Image (spheres, rainbow, N blue to C red):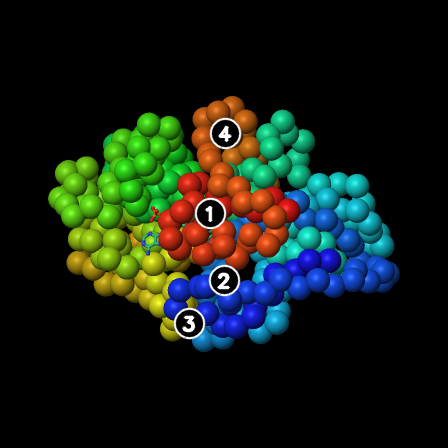
Amino acid sequence: NQSVVLAQHPKGSVILADFRIEKQVLPALNEGEILIENHWLSIDPYVRPRLNKDMSMVNPIPLGGVIQGEAIGFIIESKNPQVAAGQWVFLLSTWQRYFVTNGKNTIILPLPDSPLPKSVFLGPVGTAGRAAYFGMDRIARPKAGETVVISAASGAVGSIAGQIAKMAGAHVVGIAGGDKKCRYVVDTLGFDACVDYKTKDFKVQLRQACQEGVDVYFENVGGKIATFVAQLLNEGARVPVCGNISEYNKGGDMKTSGPEQFFQSLPSAPHAQFFLVTQWLKDYPESDAWLLHAVESGQIKYRETMHAGLEQAPQAFIDLFDGLNMGKQLVKI
Ligand code: NDP
């Protein structure tokens, strides 16, 4: 087997030396175990806080531990009566070619029949799409004519969140790094506008794009961008706090109350709510059916940035923090 493990805890920005590739001989399966061959790995920003002990949003990964992440895999052998071999699945897995599990403390969901490439179940019909769907449907609830701002707008979650808000009839403004991403967000994804936060007059441009203020801010990045959007929020605004990637390399406690409290303390007193998509696990059939239909019918568009080979996973992960991905960041094993 081939695995990517944590070689050292990152100090600030992640570097390649924080990871190590290891090879192991695959043991024979014990009773109750399942052997899955991972074909695509999802590369996700939320793995970053797990690489340090003191950023304990969720269980930290120990030194020498295999990095955890979602995957699409094929069950090649099963000694577990509840899970049949010979099927494609979405699973909470590890950065490994082969994943052995007894089915406990993980999620294994069979993939539905679909003409779409299987990798969509890690992107627009996977966790990214679900985060967009539930953040919009359960927290933001955009109405026709309202102004919705989405940060990391060209990314896996942001791109879907903005398209859902467009379908609700909102005026949708993206924020992204660079002209190429902004053009994609407007020309391909159909947002009404997109502002490049790396330009000098970002604030002027964002104000112009949001002339009636902001009713929904879908928060993916935090930091200076969030602080500025906060000034534009209207009374009654909603802020689904999906993540704050600009803070992930800074260390410290990543617990959830900070961004919520920041937004709630504003004079406009918006309804800000941090969420983890897994809190709606029992509702995945609802989100997945909706997202699958929207992607199959072409109503929702998506992009992938695909890296070849498990050994590329660390670089693909680092690239997320340098904004080098467009859409969903993936590794094809
Ligand atoms: P993306 O595909 O959006 O990739 C990350 C993007 O973030 C980069 O391409 C870059 O885009 C942007 N970015 C990186 N660093 C900075 C920075 N310092 N300032 C501003 N923008 C930055 O990733 P995802 O769609 O997978 O994740 C987006 C957010 O959603 C993350 O915060 C993640 O943690 C969160 N998330 C939360 C979930 C939940 O259950 N709550 C589930 C899944 C994701 P650009 O070039 O535009 O800067």
Where disc 4 sits, the SS reads: helix
**Residue corresponding to mark 3:** 11
The local crowd at label 2, few if under 14, some if 14 to 19, many if 20 or more residues have their Cα within 10 Å, is: some
Is 154 left or right of 118, judged from the image as shown? left
Q: Which one is in front in this view, the residue at disc 3 or the one at disc 2?
A: 2
Asked if marks 4 and 1 touch (Cβ < 8 Å), the reply is no
Q: Pick the residue in front: 11 or 311.
A: 311
**Could you say where residue 47 lies in the image, as x and y percent from the top left?**
50, 60
Where disc 2 sits, the SS reads: helix
Residue at image point 28% right, 38% down = 179
Query: First in sequence: mark 1 or mark 2?
Result: 2
Q: Amino acid at mark 4?
A: Ala
**Residue corresponding to mark 4:** 294
**Could you say where residue 272 lies in the image, as x and y percent from the top left?**
32, 55
The local crowd at label 4, few if under 14, some if 14 to 19, many if 20 or more residues have their Cα within 10 Å, is: some
Mark seen at residue 131: 1
Residue at image point 40% right, 35% down = 164
Q: Pick the residue in front: 30 or 307.
A: 307
**Could you say where residue 129 lies in the image, as x and y percent from the top left?**
49, 42
Work out how far the residue at label 1 is from the one at label 2, CA to CA, in angstroms. 28 Å
